Image (cartoon, helix red, strand yellow):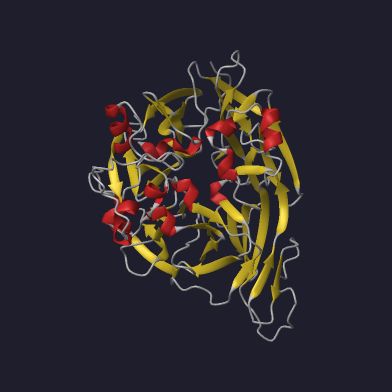
Amino acid sequence: LCRSVPSWLQGTLLRNGPGLFSVGNSEYNHWFDGLSLIHSFTFSNGEVTYRSKFLKSDTYKRNIKANKIVVSEFGTMIYPDPCKNIFSRAFTHLQNVISDFTDNNLINIIRYGQDYYASSEVNYINQIDPNTLETIGRKNYRNHIALNLATAHPHYDEEGNTYNMGTAIIGFGQPKYMIFKVPADASDKNHKKSALRKVQQICSVPFRSSLFPSYFHSFGMTENYIVFVEQPFKLDIVKLATAYFRGVNWGGCLKFDQDDMTFFHIINRKTGKEISTCFHADALVVFHHINAYEDDGHVVFDLISYKDSNLYNMFYLENIKKETSNFIQSHKSFSPPSCQRFVIPLNINKESPRGSNLVTLTDTTAQAILQEDGSIYCQPDTLFIGLELPGINYKFNAKKYRYFYGSRLEWSPHPNKIAKFDIVERKHVEWVQKDCYPSEPVFVASPGAVEEDDGVILSSIVSADPSISPFMLVLDAKTFKEIARASIPTTVHMDLHGLFIPAADSS
């Protein structure tokens, strides 16, 4: 059922997220543990076709075969048979423990070359066919580049190259964060060889503390630089390696050190060299970057920050199932997501007076204050409070931009509105419908569009009201008015992230 989906909208929106929360009599503890369900919405000649399939990961197959959960996830630890005792207490087995992550890739869809992969944050990714959603097979980053973890939020440049970032924890020499690139032409004609075979390491950044690396979920990219936020939300390596016999899950291996600082690394993505100045800010937690760009000798980057790490705790299923009023009561301390702008001056005059603000841009209140020791203390400009899952017109990625879109989060992990924020006017508009929960909004530009917000916003909507079928919502990105909705006569799950593939790219 559909009314007036624009005929120019041709392509497939792939989405990924948790879709199965129990196997046999066993249940997952955390929303981020659910088995990956891939969805697609294909737009063709004013019509929308929906399909979904479970990712046939090794984890999925092993669980289904056993008819119970047998592979540990972020918030659900499955203990090994003590008779096998493959996890000795010896630290030498760190490599075994860390390499044995689940391949339940439920966070996003990544393009490397012309191949599409379901991804999470581990060393495994699963290639999928974007048309049929069939799982083609599992790939291991570690066969191509020395990584234990990699983000599910890469960047793509105008040539089609993919940039991503990962962590080498153990078994690869010096522990470090790594930035790598997969060229646009990495796929072979028959898609038989892994696009990762052409991966290039761009640079690495050593850990500040080898046992407590920063957790990161995404990073920023400008025309010339990579922006990496080394935050005091950290992975405890010893705890991770000993999680099985301590009886803690992997989620319990993350810790927020509120007394530490946040450090900003600005790395030239052409040369791999990092700017030597120390840029730092107060403690914060960040999952999603919005955009980054260069402006008159500054690097400007926008991200969504929190004052603490309670967000992960909100998504334990026992918390999500609470009635909204109880949820609000028990999460009064929840730190709302804050869209913040940081500005880094690139040309620092060491003779500048100490205590002076080196930001000379006039369109922001962000500051970069020169300290006695020559370091730069950064204070953000708060753009907007209460928005997550940000998206932009990706043609403006790494460029100066004006608008971003996202899901409104107000006292609950369930987004109930979609918002468009205008950075210049510092105003926002919203779409809302009672009892409806939208997924991450995705911007698709109109053909030949020049203006940044000339296009549509796509979001799949699920409802708590049984009389409202799930539907794909199409909004005019300029006015934020509804253009069309296509109702889906089946159950659709809330998802996390995804990717729009224009029709010309998927053929």
The x, y position of residue 62, in whole percent, is 28, 33
Q: Which residue appears farthest toward the top when viewing the image?
A: 467
Q: Nearer the viewer, residue 190 or 14?
A: 14
In the displayed structure, does residue 195 sit left or right of residue 159?
Answer: left
Q: Which residue appears farthest toward the bottom when viewing the image?
A: 351
In what quadrant of the picture does the C terminus appear?
top left
Against 238, residue 37 (above or below) is above
Q: How many marks?
A: 0
**Residue at image point 58% right, 58% down:** 292
**Residue at image point 56% right, 17% down:** 469
Q: Nearer the viewer, residue 370 or 248?
A: 248
In the displayed structure, does residue 215 sit left or right of residue 441?
Answer: left
Quadrant of the rendered structure where residue 73 is? top left
**Residue at image point 66% right, 63% down:** 282
Quadrant of the rendered structure where residue 363 is? bottom right
Against 362, residue 487 (above or below) is above
The x, y position of residue 386, in whole percent, is 69, 43
Q: Nearer the viewer, residue 318 or 170?
A: 318
**Residue at image point 48% right, 17% down:** 490
